[in-house]
Amino acid sequence: MSDVVEYRIDLLLRHAHLYTVEARFPVGGAEPWVDLKLPVWTPGSYLVREFERHLQELVCDDGEGRPLPVRKVDKSTWRVDARAARRIRARYKVYAWDLTVRSAHLDDTHGFWNGACVFLYTDALASGPHRVVVAPPLGWQVTVGLEETEPHTYVARSYDELVDSPFEVGTHEVVSFLAQSKAHRLAIWGRVETPRDTLVADFIKIIETAQAVFGEPLPYPDYTFILLTAANQYGGLEHARSCALLTSPFTFQPRKKYEEFLELVSHEFFHLWNVKRIHPEALGPFDYQRENYTRSLWVMEGVTSYYDRYLLVRAGLQPPKRYLEKLGEELGKIAAIPGRFRQSLEESSFDAWIKLYRPDENSVNSTISYYLKGGVVSLLLDLEIRTQSKGTRSLDDVMRLLWQRYGKAGKGFPDDGVQAIVEEASGCALAAFFDRYVRGREELDANPILRTVGLQVKAGAEDDDENKAPQGWLGCNLKDDGESVLVTAALDGGPAVGAGIYANDEIIALDGFRCDLSGLKDRLAGRAPGDRVTLTLFRREELRSIAITLGEKPPEKWEVVPVEDPTDAERAAYQAWMGQPLESESEKKDA
């Protein structure tokens, strides 16, 4: 008896967005029952998403037509009365109408799916081989980062590898190229007007620059990029031999938007080391039925968020000036989040399952993203290592040690061992850094560390008028709601909270005059901190008037710029970090 789990999946019901799946599980014949399960989450996206809610019409037989009773025993487990059967054949459908990189989508143009959404499994057979036969419509092709043993037949060494291999089926374009002497494919669904030779050249630069961080050959036989484009979409999900990228067809121009797309490519590609192979013990092997907790997601995502754009600079795909502009934007975003004082990076990592992917009106007051803050902290950690080691070590050395000791060896690092690993790789004392920025909730003061490379953070108004009088501030986040203004969050410690303005309040007038969002901002710009104004609003359809004393508006614009007169040591440190000379403010003026 073969121990291979076999699946057949067809796309005949694509107008109904239903995959039809047949799965065959060999059993020993002695089991009174066998549990078939579907994951409740997918690796790389740390939220229980309840994929089982889309599985329907499950029936089982012994492979020869004799029915086997099935009883659902929990939300994601179906118990099959196997009796003396030598195999179980399960037939079911999966509804697929979620166009994201972490789920499944099917229509008349293509089918895309992650295995966690589609393939049932058994614990007893999960570590063995799994074979998938795809029955595509006439003229459609299949792209997946698995070995193809026969036409449209693909084999994974385990259920983990199967779940880690998204499928794209359709009339998509496939562009093949070599990088570091290994085969790569770019599968494109949707409109992408960028010339293919430009995409390939830029992808190769990203691949080669990321590989140089680790200093060893690429850790795969071949690699597949699946690029999906649709309006108002954005996201990516990493895999060991592939990645899925989702973006708008309008992100390929102008250049700034294209660089944001390249950041996405760089981010997901760097993950093939940092999370797919280098990861904490909790993230492999996976438990697909419940949350897998770790305090190190800031390492997986924050460090990767630092490298994604930094690698573009190293590859010559983004100028340092643009890199620093984006850094300033990130520092401004962090400064606008009161939750930075409520949650550390380790706490943010651990609570990802219940907080990061489930934002609400209080999230800005209670949480901080381990992507956003984690990326900035990783940058500061890199500069701190470079400073303490006098330029002899960097975060690259940390990544290489993690690769050699854990990623290459196929084992996870201890969740409480990150600081020790970084200190060993760098030769630096970093307890104070970790206490403050990783385990602690203190203000993120970037200036002292940025000064080591001749940079400083400047905060000001959008129009850069240093003599402009301070403006009044409501202390809440707002969005345009047609002819009114919707409060999306009242910021902790701001005037709105003190005055009793709530999330979901619909502001319709300021001091008796109707206003939309633009008008409200214009009128507040002429008010000073301490001024008292009256807001007219609807709350649960009830008209109210609330008086509020304005606070001082925080800086709108954050910039990372060179100091006036950097020292020779700071210039050298910047050159070593950015690969280009530092141009000071005075030198810019002289030019």
Image (cartoon, helix red, strand yellow):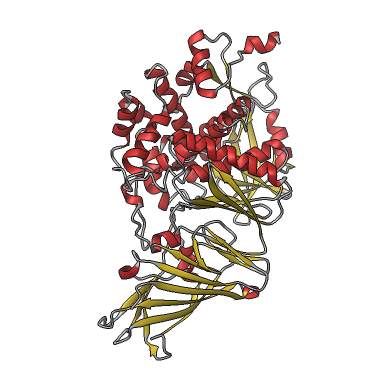
Residue 100: x, y in percent? 57, 57
Q: Is residue 285 above or below residue 296?
A: below
Residue 221: x, y in percent? 47, 51
Left/right of residue 482 with respect to residue 47 in the rendered view: right
- Which residue is nearer to you in this view: 232 or 322? 322
In the rendered image, the residue lying farthest to the front is 181
Q: At x 60% / y 46%, what residue is drawn?
A: 487
Residue 586: x, y in percent? 64, 9
Residue 571: x, y in percent? 53, 13
Q: Is residue 442 above or below residue 259?
A: above
Q: Quadrant of residue 29?
A: bottom left
- Which residue is nearer to you in this view: 482 or 404? 404
Left/right of residue 330 with respect to residue 119 in the rendered view: right
Residue 517 visible in the shown view: yes
Q: Quadrant of residue 385?
A: top left
Q: At x 29% / y 32%, what residue is drawn?
A: 420
